[in-house]
Image (cartoon, rainbow, N blue to C red):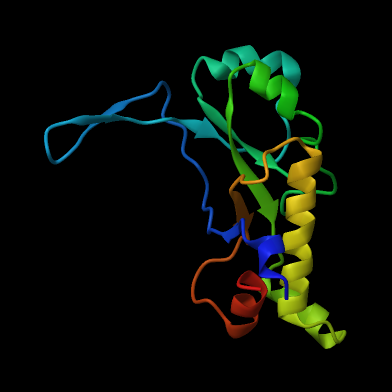
Amino acid sequence: MKRECVARFVAALLLGMAATGAAQTARLAGGGTEESYPGFDRNDYPGDAALPALRKTFRYTGYWLNKPQGESSNSWVGKRAILRRCGFGFLVLFTGRTDAKIKAEERKGRDAAELGAAEGRAAVAAAAREGFPKNVLIFLDQEEGGRLLPEQAAYLFA
């Protein structure tokens, strides 16, 4: 597999991002402070008109490159430019296959690693289409917690 095609396709378990209101300051062990950056994550794009009000509270947003889990479409496509104009940063997200879907593909003769590599390339291509830089960090949302099963590992680390 061509690992360079998926080098930025990073697996992360995203359990949800809690919104805390305005940016807060945390006291570090050494006495210094560190600013936090609250963000929001939702499956449906909130709408252009809502962005100024959201920006008063949030510094970044989750940005879906493909359909969020359980959705039939992706309403975030083409919205990067307006979000940038409103001052948002991004947590770039790609929905990965659940274990059940990986196993279903394996029963059809498709290798989990092959599937993971293909979807990694799809994530990189989608990020490029949306105008993200080549070195953008893409988080894989697999929607399953617990132990990492062998087929999931093959898919994730392809």
Q: Is residue 107 left or right of residue 26?
A: right
Of 117 and 105, the residue lying toward us: 117
Q: Position of residue 135 (x, y in %)?
A: 61, 46
Taking the spot 72% from the left edge, 66% from the top edge, the residue there is 97
Q: Is residue 3 left or right of residue 26?
A: right
- Relative vertical location of residue 36 with respect to residue 118 in this rendering, above or below: above
Of 28 and 16, the residue lying toward us: 28
Q: Is residue 15 visible?
A: yes
Taking the spot 51% from the left edge, 14% from the top edge, the residue there is 56
Q: Position of residue 157 (x, y in %)?
A: 60, 72
- Relative vertical location of residue 126 with respect to residue 30 in this rendering, above or below: below
Of 103 and 90, the residue lying toward us: 90
Quarter in which the C terminus is drawn: bottom right
Taking the spot 79% from the left edge, 57% from the top edge, the residue there is 122
Quarter in which the N terminus is drawn: bottom right
Q: Position of residue 73 (x, y in %)?
A: 84, 44
- Relative vertical location of residue 50 with respect to residue 40 in this rendering, above or below: above
Q: Is residue 70 visible?
A: no
